[in-house]
């Protein structure tokens, strides 16, 4: 598989883990498993953990190191709300299916909390503040609130006066959602990999699969070094690399998102009510969170064009703009930027992830969490793919499958 550059700049999360466990390459060995997962990021690690914990003989193959791809460039916001509002998704796929998808996202956050507790990983529940970027967005945001409340999601409506009483900025209205969280994504992937290895998961780093053949129902995955893995099932958890699908199964847009992490704030963060995670209705949207060491993390300014990964001057311009957006909301936060990066960001054209069977190849599956909710999608995929491999058919599978009607309708 061809390596793609996924980010540029200085990443924060890898600096928070001084020593990470490493795993040997496959080399010239041959081995057989029930399932081989290609990709050792967030999706691959969560899937590997759940499958191994279910007693399924599983291997994860990573061509570099665990968590070296998009996972280390995430900002670690965990939310059940999606880039597409529930009310908009209801218009697209019907209210029943839209609510089922949002409910699955909410359950995934709860499952992640349970998983974090099981592997003794720090998981912080944190409400989110979803702001109306302009007065024109207020009616849609209010409609979103009503639909969320109708279906039992834990939400409150904040008026402009309530926002002003809790924050140093003014907005026309907002939804407060409970049941969200924040994590360190880099540490989570490593914690999952370590825990999964103890459950029996085999992990190969520095192992690049160059050929995938099928004979008599068995998948043969081979490397240039002469190594070979045989498996009944193969899961591709390869991040934002649609060419690996060898066809036109995925209709997606790849662009870049920017993120900054400030130095620890020398002043109090009391102006930041309950350290709520913040995002907005504008597209592309600004999103903000804090860290326990008083750093502030901001992201947004999505841009199309792969040249941004190589254009230092343009990246610096957008980084400065992101910092100014942060200061416009919190003018007393004056710590400088310590880390800044630009990362590849994928969005499906119908705003849903790609999870499920390959429609053209037997026992091949995909776990592609396109969108701003990739970590949540990884939890959904881990359970859904496990059930599919066991011969079950989860109801959600039809909503996120690769040949779903909402995607087929697009040209």
Image (cartoon, rainbow, N blue to C red):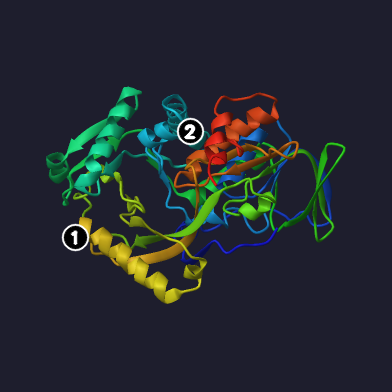
Q: Position of residue 393 (x, y in %)?
A: 63, 24
Q: Residue at x 72, y 57 (%)?
A: 208
Per the image, the residue denoted by label 2 is 108
Per the image, the residue denoted by label 1 is 331
The first of marks 1 and 2 along the sequence is: 2
Q: Position of residue 230 (x, y in %)?
A: 81, 43
Q: Position of residue 341 (x, y in %)?
A: 44, 64
Q: In this rendering, would 177 be left or right of 331?
A: right
Which mark is drawn over residue 224?
none
Kindly indicate the quadrant of the structure image that contains residue 195.
Answer: top right
The residues bearing labels 1 and 2 have C-alpha atoms spaced at a distance of 35 Å
Local SS, label 2: helix
Q: Residues within 10 Å of mark 1 (few under 14, many from 20)?
A: few
Q: Nearer the viewer, residue 116 or 34?
A: 34
Residue 210 visible in the current orientation: yes
Q: In this rendering, would 25 be left or right of 131?
A: right
């Amino acid at each position: 598989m061809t390596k793609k550059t996924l980010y540029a700049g200085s990443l924060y999360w890898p600096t928070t883990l001084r020593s990470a466990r490493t795993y040997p390459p496959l080399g010239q060995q041959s081995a057989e498993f029930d399932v081989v997962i290609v990709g050792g990021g967030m999706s691959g690690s969560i899937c590997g953990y759940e499958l191994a914990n279910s007693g399924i003989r599983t291997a994860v193959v990573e061509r570099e190191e665990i968590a070296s791809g998009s996972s280390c460039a995430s900002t670690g916001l965990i939310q059940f709300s999606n880039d597409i509002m529930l009310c908009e998704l209801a218009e697209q796929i019907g209210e029943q299916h839209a609510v089922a998808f949002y409910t699955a996202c909410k359950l995934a956050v709860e499952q992640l909390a349970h998983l974090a507790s099981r592997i003794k990983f720090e998981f912080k529940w944190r409400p989110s503040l979803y702001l109306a970027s302009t007065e024109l967005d207020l009616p849609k945001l209010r409609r979103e609130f009503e639909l969320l409340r109708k279906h039992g999601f834990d939400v409150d409506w904040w008026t402009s006066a309530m926002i002003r009483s809790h924050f140093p900025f003014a907005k026309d209205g907002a939804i407060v959602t409970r049941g969200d969280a924040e994590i360190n994504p880099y540490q989570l992937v490593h914690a999952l990999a370590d825990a999964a290895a103890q459950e029996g998961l085999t992990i190969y780093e520095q192992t690049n699969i160059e050929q995938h053949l099928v004979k008599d129902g068995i998948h043969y995955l081979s490397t240039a070094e002469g190594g070979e893995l045989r498996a009944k099932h193969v899961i591709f958890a390869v991040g934002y690399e649609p060419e690996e699908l060898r066809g036109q199964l995925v209709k997606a847009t790849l662009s870049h998102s920017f993120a900054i992490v400030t130095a620890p704030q020398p002043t109090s963060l009391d102006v930041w009510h309950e350290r709520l995670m913040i995002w907005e209705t504008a597209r592309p949207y600004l999103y903000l969170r804090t860290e326990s060491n008083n750093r502030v993390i901001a992201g947004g300014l999505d841009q199309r064009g792969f040249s941004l990964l190589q254009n230092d001057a343009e990246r610096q311009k957008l980084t400065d703009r992101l910092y100014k957006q942060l200061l416009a909301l919190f003018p007393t936060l004056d710590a400088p930027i310590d880390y800044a990066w630009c990362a590849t960001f994928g969005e499906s054209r119908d705003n849903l992830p790609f999870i499920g069977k390959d429609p053209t190849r037997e026992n091949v599956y995909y776990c592609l969490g396109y969108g701003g909710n990739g970590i949540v999608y990884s939890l959904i995929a881990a359970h859904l793919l496990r059930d599919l491999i066991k011969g079950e058919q989860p109801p959600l599978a039809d909503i996120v499958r690769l040949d779903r009607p909402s995607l087929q309708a697009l040209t």
